[in-house]
Image (cartoon, rainbow, N blue to C red):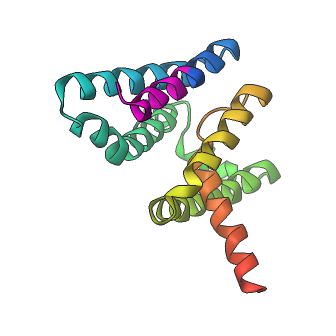
Amino acid sequence: MPAKIMIEYLTLAFVLILSIIGHNSTVIYAAIIVLVLKIISQVSGQPFILEWMGSHGLNLGIIILTAAVLVPIADGTVTISTIINSFKSPIGIVAVIAGLLAAISGGVGVPLMQTNPNVIPALIVGTMAGVFFFKGIAVGPLIAAGFTYFVMSIIEHFK
């Protein structure tokens, strides 16, 4: 097995081990899925499986996440009046603004990751640190990329 491929497996295994130590089931499942896809791609000689996950997995994940967030509307927990009342409290207004900023951040984060793939490892390390050490959830890379974009835009503006 070429050294490059071995390093890829070792890196994924390292992430898996850290996830197990950190008791983060989300990252455990993600690492296992990627390892399995990597093995299938390698054994079958068909890298399209892993490539498909790399190019479409983000959209699929966002669809599933959005669907999960919409379930309270579907089951009646959140109603039109609940939504309207959310604009009447300070926490509701802050939540609307936070949602707006997160959506904008994610929207500019995707192009940043596509045009500057060298930023992805740093985003992953930052997200993993947040997951492992601060009990965060691994939805951070997309929003972190957006924050990175905003910070870099501000820095560029003042150069």
- Count of residue discs: 0
Is residue 46 covered in magenta?
no
Seen from the viewer's position, the closer of residues 60 and 130 is 130
Give the quarter of the image for residue 114.
bottom left
- Identify the residue at image location x=78%, y=51%: 89
Residue 13, above or below 63: above
Seen from the viewer's position, the closer of residues 40 and 59 is 40
Residue furthest front as drawn: 2
**Quarter in which the C terminus is drawn:** bottom right
**Quarter in which the N terminus is drawn:** top left
Left/right of residue 58 with respect to residue 39 in the rendered view: right
Left/right of residue 52 with respect to residue 150 in the rendered view: left
Residue 117, visible in the rendered structure: yes
Q: Position of residue 157 (x, y in %)?
A: 72, 85
Where does the magenta region start and end? 1-13
- Identify the residue at image location x=22%, y=39%: 48
Q: Position of residue 64 (x, y in %)?
A: 41, 36
Q: Position of residue 17 (x, y in %)?
A: 61, 16
- Identify the residue at image location x=18%, y=33%: 46
Seen from the viewer's position, the closer of residues 84 and 23 is 23
Seen from the viewer's position, the closer of residues 2 and 34 is 2
Residue 81, above or below 152: above
Magenta-highlighted stretch: main secondary structure?
A: helix
Residue 88, visible in the rendered structure: no
Left/right of residue 46 with respect to residue 85 in the rendered view: left
- Identify the residue at image location x=25%, y=34%: 49
Q: Position of residue 79 (x, y in %)?
A: 54, 40
Residue 47, above or below 80: above
